[in-house]
Image: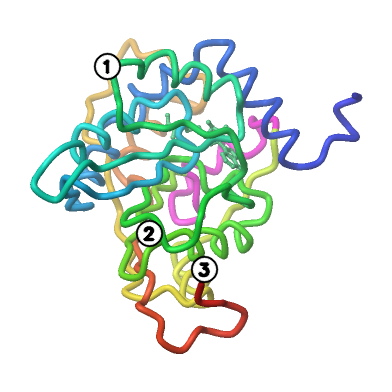
Amino acid sequence: MPEKSLNPDEKLQLEFNRWATAGEGEKMERHHLDITEKTIRLMDLRPGERVLDLGCGAGWATRLLARLVADGPEGFGQVVGLDISDEMIRSARTASKDFENILYVWGSAQQIPWEENFFDKVLSVESFYYYPDQERALHELFRVMAPHGRMFLLINLYKDNPYSLQWVDQLKVPVQVRSEAEYVELLKKHAFENVEARRIPDDTPTPDDYQTKSFRNLEDLRAFKRIGALLLMASKPDLRTPAPGYTIY
Ligand SMILES: C[S@@+](CC[C@H](N)C(=O)[O-])C[C@H]1O[C@@H](n2cnc3c(N)ncnc32)[C@H](O)[C@@H]1O
């Protein structure tokens, strides 16, 4: 099928399949590990919890989560890694053969193939700004999260980090560019509560001989890391009266 006639999710699948085939899935661990570890500390994960890793890529963060929730007095925790790229899912499965508590699923954030009220925590690393319909994805997240469940969306490309905007024209798929304030409003509009935003700087050093294709120069890269990623945190309320448009199952 010609690329032009693909729908937005199919275009994302095709592009991220290319990334996966080029080995980019595994390489992203190096770039995202520092900010992800800081976020995971904030997630306060407990053994027995059910976690969704949305846009899991090659699954390195999924495995970090799986170790933390695996086994404990609260039961056997499970992690679901979901991604639009079937090639990413294939690599993630291959690298996670030793884990009994991970399930990788191929699907879209805009139609999460899972039951309602299930996940205690959601992590999404560097994926949310690719979603063509972020409102639809938020609706889906709200649906699959358990009452009192909490989500953590880590976003590197956003208006308040001007250095990140250099990528917009380099990427081969369209992206959503919003500010922290716009994202906070969006989450509140979707009935999430305890909405918080934080900056998560990347404290890894950038060596002077580091080669970058994504930034004009190393000073821009360092400034980008200093400002850091935007972390959005929000909870699903324990709804007794559903918000307009939501059903309690
Ligand atoms: C920049 S990569 C980050 C991957 C991984 N979280 C990491 O940090 O290594 C973005 C990921 O989001 C996935 N993605 C993009 N759009 C998606 C969508 N609509 N639904 C689910 N996953 C999506 C891509 O396939 C890709 O694996």
Q: How dense is the environment of label 2, judged by Cα within 10 Å: few (below 14), some, or many (20 and up)? A: many
Label 3: element kind: helix
247 or 168: nearer the viewer: 247
Horizontal and vertical percent for residue 6? 84, 35
Mark 1 = which residue? 207
Q: Which residues are magenta?
A: 157-172
Which residue position holds label 3?
182
Q: Quadrant of residue 194?
A: bottom left
Q: How many marks?
A: 3
Closer mark to the observer between disc 1 and disc 3: 3
Indicate the quadrant where residue 16 lies. top right
Q: Amino acid at mark 2?
A: Leu
Number of the label disc, if any, that sits on residue 92: none
In the foreground, 166 or 178:
178
User: CB of mark 1 within 8 Å of CB of mark 3?
Assistant: no
Q: Most extreme residue toward the bottom, as rendered?
A: 241
* Residue 27 placement, left or right of 222: right
Going from N to C along the chain, the mark reached first, 1 or 3, is 3
Secondary structure state at the residue bearing disc 2: strand
